Image (spheres, rainbow, N blue to C red):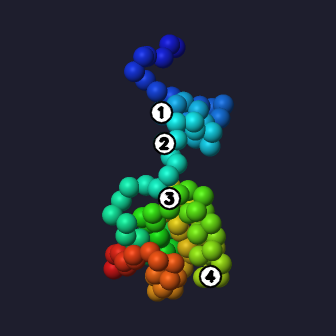
Amino acid sequence: MARQKNSKLVFSTEFGRACPECGNPVDQCSCGKDEGIPEGDGIVRVSRETKGRKGKGVTLVTGVPVTKDELKTLAKELKQKCGTGGALKDRVIEIQGDQRDLLVELLKAKGFQVKKAGG
């Protein structure tokens, strides 16, 4: 099957997800599209969610205006301060349990403008 001129590769069984701009694997992207600080309103939002987790609650931290590497370091530090596990998925930091109050204080101490989101 021949590729059309206006179609772009987004997944390959050979290497997984591909950057739609340059066609390279996402972790080897050469177009620089994913690097840098994302645009937004500059407010870090801290919320709690249980959807899709069988009733287990997690605290979500979104909108952090830092680069990808700094976000990874921040996620690790927040997990250590809370004494819980967590994950970093699509620029969203997930911390296990309801840690909103502690995370708001930690992020404010780091100089971010923070808001509690949701109920």
Q: Provide the secondary structure element on which disc 2 rests.
A: loop
- Amino acid at circle 4: Lys
- Amino acid at circle 1: Glu
Label 3 neighbour load within 10 Å: few <14, some 14-19, many 20+: some
CA gap, disc 2 and disc 1: 8 Å
Q: Which residue is mark 3?
A: 91
Label 1 neighbour load within 10 Å: few <14, some 14-19, many 20+: some
Q: Which mark is residue 81?
A: 4
Q: Which residue is mark 2?
A: 33
Give the residue drawn at x 47%, y 56%: 37
Residue mark closest to the camera, 2 vs 4:
2
Q: Are marks 2 and 4 in contact (CB under 8 Å)?
A: no
Sequence-wise, the earlier of marks 4 and 1 is 1
Q: Which residue is mark 1?
A: 21
Above or below, 20 against 2 in this view is below
CA gap, disc 2 and disc 3: 14 Å
